[in-house]
Image (tube, rainbow, N blue to C red):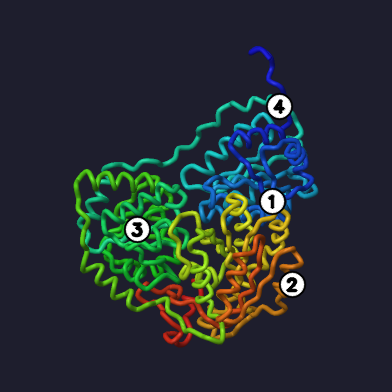
Amino acid sequence: MNKDSPVPEKSGAEILIDTLIEQGVDTVFGYPGGAVLPIYDALFQQTKIRHILVRHEAGAAHAAEGYARSTGKPGVVLVTSGPGATNAVTGIADAFMDSIPLIVLTGQVATNLIGSDAFQEADTIGITRHCSKHNYLVKDPAELATVVREAFTIATKGRPGPVVIDIPKNVQVATAASDVKRPARTRFTFAGEADYTEINRAVELIAKAKAPILYTGGGIINSGPAASEALRELAELTGAPVTSTLMGLGAYPASGEAWLGMLGMHGTYEANMAMNQCDVMVCLGARFDDRVTGRLDAFSPDSIKIHVDIDRSSMNKTVRVDLPIVADVGTAMRQMIDVWKGRKYKKQPLDQWWSRIAGWRAVDCLSYPGSTQEIMPQYAIERLFEATKDKAPIITTEVGQHQMWAAQHFHFDAPNKWLTSGGLGTMGYGLPAAIGAQMGDPNALVIDIAGEASIQMNIQEMATATQYRLPVKVFILNNEWMGMVRQWQELTYESRYSESYSDSLPDFVALAEAYGWKGIRCDDPAKLDDAIAEMLAYDGPVMFDCRVHKTSNCFPMIPSGAAHTDMILSADQVSGTMDDEAKALV
């Protein structure tokens, strides 16, 4: 073909697939339907993208999240119009809250039918407007390539998030020139390097601090492995202790000397007290979530607060800070390190500060009653950690008590190994996320730590693991209750357990076998290690029904509406119930 020859035309569906390949996509999680059949036909006729058939569109979105978080690449979802799109909304909202890069491709009825209540029509753009970073309704196949390129930029640059592309069926069928080299539009600017005046001021404040703390979050994970390396170096240079939100676990190693553990509602006593008593707080890639701050007027009242975040809208949104720095957190930390070294600052001894922290650590806030008769849930997590710590596992979770026990008692030394639903708290997240993570890293050990209630939210995805021969492991802490709901009902509603007991639970071992998995059950602490070893030795998917103590509560805990200094450390400290204001904040 000479340079004057016209560019050959392709269908919108073919242009879409070509552009996904151009963007480096190798995996798509989806479920077919009438409004996306042209796209599925185009997928059938190529070999560079593998499609993973989930059993529910929510599973597709969560699997794409797991893939994105474990690989660092954006996850891609393909679902049909109407119920296909609305079923995916929970996963879209989850990714939006936790800043996970997704490209969500949804089918739509033909453009001439939009607004007529056609079969399987839904206003996908309107529905997802407030739970996506950006969304598009594409009405011209000639625009598809440009929109897709721009969507990948938006999803991955700045604060990551989900981008929805709604594609009417006639646009998928219609043809247009297949010039996939047209550049994406550049309508957006993203924060990168920080202002050096602000960096210099931050370094000066840290160097003069007598009781500093590095408060770290999921933004460090999202920034990439180099950001986690920068955090470790910054902590070593400054001598400051490090704590983390739920989403930031693994950015600083749990085995590191400066590690205080997770902070917040179910964080450690030492982390929360250090946050409350510090004189300089450096917030790195976190957003002052309500589960972290507790009562705002009592949150670290005497500290100078530095906040580094890529999202300008996060600045002073919840907590007023003294020095806001809008930048990529990894880049900003590297700038801080350069300035610290350039000024030849020495590592601060901070002996008095660390002595106070040692006193808080001595409380041993994560201790729990032992038992030789029943498996305590904390003990189950500890034994699972000991059995797998040398295998660098990827851990996903569902949502509830088991999630918090995993965060407290499983320890992470590397980023991208802890995948959990933080901001939205989505039950049913863990199993499809584990499937996505396993697809992204086929050789990894991937374990979903689950509860017997939460696992049933997307339990149909067991079939997906079976179909694609994915050796995921599901480790259920089975206490027969919606554990966190029961805990709040005990502490807040005078033990009126309204609809929180899980009647009619399935036989999880028989269910595993029905799906072609291996099923294991254990209720004896003396046999737990052997049962875990059996799970790990099996070369295929396993569902482990770990029968644990039924009424254990997750401590320590900051009651809703309380200050960090009002932590409940054990059940012995609970007296009475919380007031109406606290109930409103649960």
Q: Which mark is residue 510?
A: 2
Q: Quadrant of residue 551?
A: bottom right
Q: Residue at x 58, y 71 (%)?
A: 532
Whether 269 is drawn above or below 332: the answer is below
**Disc 2 and disc 4: Cα gap in Å?**
53 Å
- Count of numbered circles in the view: 4
For marks 2 and 4 on the same chain, the one whose residue lies earlier in the sequence: 4
Quadrant for the N terminus, please: top right
Percent coordinates x, y for residue 469 in the rendering: 69, 55
Cα distance between the residues tagged 3 and 2: 54 Å
Residue linked to disc 4: 176
* Amino acid under disc 3: Arg
Residue 270 occupies quadrant: bottom left
Q: Amino acid at mark 2?
A: Ala
Q: Earlier in the sequence, mark 4 or mark 3?
A: 4
| Label 2 vs label 4, nearer the camera | 2
Question: At numbered mark 2, what does the secondary structure look like: helix, strand or loop?
Answer: helix
Residue at 75% across / 41% down in the picture? Answer: 40
Q: Which residue position is annotated with label 3?
A: 320
Q: Is residue 365 left or right of residue 207?
A: right
Q: Position of residue 302 (x, y in %)?
A: 27, 65
CA–CA distance in space, label 4 to label 3: 51 Å
The residue beneath circle 1 is 85
Q: Residue at x 59, y 64 (%)?
A: 448
